[in-house]
Image (cartoon, rainbow, N blue to C red):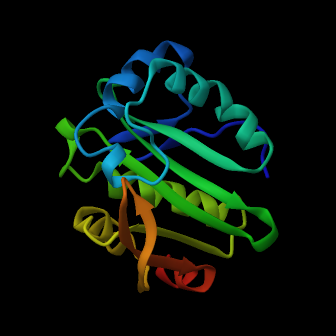
Amino acid sequence: MPTALPQLPTARLLLRALEMDQAERLFTLANGPNIADNTANIPSPYTLEIAQDFIAGIAEKYRAGESLNMGMHVRETAELVGIVSLRINARHRYGHLGGWVAAHCRNQGYAAESARAILDFGFSTLGLQRVGSQCFGRNKASARVMQNIGLRYEGCMREAFLKNGVYEDLLGFAMVREDWERAL
């Protein structure tokens, strides 16, 4: 696994590690509508200290082979509009996609554009065999993103996640290396 954090350009975005001076912006965006409610690991409220800790750990987690966390930055303006991540299980050569887009930037294709770029990086550079993700059954937008980038629907795990006192269904999606190579 490469040790230097990558920068991944897409048609409209630059995916790159966040810098500490972006903590206030991250704090503001992560407290936006539906961010914590639709994600497994983002607390609510999301504090400035949590944002700072997240940013401080990005490089170390990548060097340790645990995860790649990148900010979605609009190329024209450098505005931070969301986060995309790939949690890595090196033993199984598996990557788990995650992420979110700020409320004011949804429905513009940023989630799919960034997820596709990090998926390609996972297969091409990290040598992953499988990349997948999950979303709550009620989160139709995330399910569409996963299908739009070519992940196959693999099924529903009923009431598999306890979120805010409610058992949530988890929808599973994935792509294996052979499917990715065939699509090139």
Q: Give me the residue at 37% from left, 57% from top.
A: 165
Evaluate whether residue 75 shows in this view. no
- Up the image or down, 80 lies above or below 25; here it is below
**Relative to 63, is 182 on the left or the right?**
left
Residue 172 place in picture, x, y as percent:
45, 77
Evaluate whether residue 146 shows in this view. yes
**Relative to 107, is 152 on the left or the right?**
right
- Up the image or down, 131 lies above or below 20; here it is below
**Relative to 72, is 130 on the left or the right?**
right
Count of numbered circles on the image: 0
Q: Give me the residue at 70% from left, 33% from top.
A: 59
Residue 61 place in picture, x, y as percent:
72, 40
Q: Nearer the viewer, residue 105 or 163?
A: 163
Residue 81 place in picture, x, y as percent:
32, 34
Residue 12 place in picture, x, y as percent:
32, 42
Residue furthest to the front: 165
- Residue 78 image-quadrant placement: top left
Q: Give me the residue at 77% from left, 50% from top.
A: 65
- Residue 80 image-quadrant placement: top left
- Up the image or down, 138 lies above or below 108; here it is below
- Residue 121 image-quadrant placement: bottom right
Residue furthest to the top: 21
Q: Give me the residue at 39% from left, 57% from top.
A: 163
